[in-house]
Image (tube, helix red, strand yellow):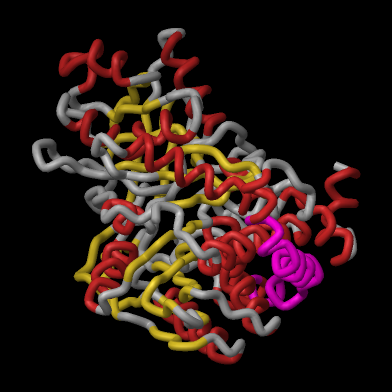
Amino acid sequence: MLVRRRSLLSSVAGLAGAVAVSSGPAEAQSREEHREVAGRIVGACLADVDGMEKLTYLCDRIGHRLAGSASLNRAIAWAADTMRADGLRNVATPAVKVPVWIRGRESVTLLAPETRELPMLGLGGSIATPPEGITAEVVAAPDFDALDALGKAGIEGKVVLFNAAYAGYGNTVRYRASGPSRAAEYGAVAALVRSVTPVSLYTPHTGALRYTVDAPKIPAAAITVEDAEWIARLQARGVAVRVRLRMEARTEPDADSANVIGEIPGRTLPDEVVVMGGHIDSWDVGQGAQDDGSGCLAPMQALALIQKLGLRPRRTLRVCLWTNEENGLRGGNAYRSWSETRRERHVAAIEMDGGAERPVGFGLGLRNTGPSRENQLARALARLRPVGALLDGIHAGEIVAGGGGADIGPLMDAGVPGLGLRTVGEKYFHWHHTHADTLDKVDLQDFRACMAAMGVMGYVLADMPETLLG
């Protein structure tokens, strides 16, 4: 930790020297071309105060920003005004229609073997219960195999609790996403899901579910890890558990929203674009600080600093704050369509949607499934690693295969190389989709380092003579 802090607080001259360390001849030539400018960008980011001030405003004055909400609309207008004030060019807010889900009042009351209220959060997209709620016995299942073993005889008329131990986000989130429909196939009247997190301080985590068309829709909510474990232990000892679930959730017609775009036009190849950004919407709890306010402000402020430094890359360097990532991905799809009408060519897309913990590097993904994919990926990684080396001074230069993001997925489907900022990821899923996703969880120096990583990667990809695939 002490070594990291000293590195992050080094002088601009020291950082410029750090990124100049040479290795192979080809890497050294590429690194030398952008060594000085990378040092300037890193130095400006590590000394910056405005980025955190902007993130503070977004979190403290605007707050959480679910798709279709008035607070999201305020955030979009504020972000566009801020980009203009920072001197970014071609600021635009292309319209996007987004789904509207309203949480309403909600509760889970334990009725047996004792009576008390359980902390809960309804899952995004859930339907409501009847006004009087749903009262039923709970049956716990640690995984889908256990659910199938219970079958209709063990599930019909009951509330299914998915008590799946955390085994990484990708492996565990499936119980939240598809568990309610799987339980409904066996006649469950509602579903409870153990919050998807490795660590809990009695905090429920929300997130979207996905109903399938061939199963009844049932209400679904997340409860804490602690309560899920307790209920499972009671049931394992033959103690009946009974709850009453009440939810007023509803879905309304699609609403008007927008992506937010600003850029530095390319000096010689303005129709070739490197886009970087995060999603401006968040769940309707907490402040959306880590998910994904920091992922919006880090690249947005990096671009503002690049503009302030008077740097202009060969290609257009653009920031996009995508709308509706959390429960629809409408912004990412709309961005691709908007760009196609402009006949632009994206040469790279960079997403930051893993929080602003200490950055370690970038993951690179290609979605070309043809026979040349492995060769393309190897070539792109070879060209990207010297760029990553420019960030070795802040220990953020690691380049690995496998990366991208949800909002840049549509671009990647069209063949655009996608990069995702990688961090240490030590605590992100402790706060993810909770009331605790607040500004105090964002460390200033880590945020500045993320800003520097995004700024250097974006600028160099937009400025280097060749492209990752060209």
Can the viewer see residue 205? no
Name the residue: 29% across, 73% down: 339
412 above or below 156?
below
State yes or no: residue 32 in magenta: yes
Quick one: 461 or 268, which is closer to the camera? 268
Residue farthest toward the top in the current orientation of the protein:
237
Name the residue: 90% across, 51% down: 6
Residue 423 position by quadrant: top right
236 above or below 269?
above
Residue 345 position by quadrant: bottom left
Name the residue: 70% across, 81% down: 309
Q: Position of residue 272 (x, y in %)?
A: 39, 72
- Quadrant of the snapshot with the N terminus: top right
Range drawn in magenta: 30-55
> Viewed as shown, does residue 298 lie left or right of 240?
right
Quick one: 115 or 302, which is closer to the camera? 302
The tally of labels here is: 0
Q: Which secondary structure type mostly characterizes the magenta part of the structure?
A: helix
- Quadrant of the snapshot with the C terminus: bottom left
State yes or no: residue 408 in magenta: no
Can the viewer see residue 358? yes
Residue farthest toward the left in the current orientation of the protein:
214
Q: Position of residue 359 (x, y in %)?
A: 67, 49
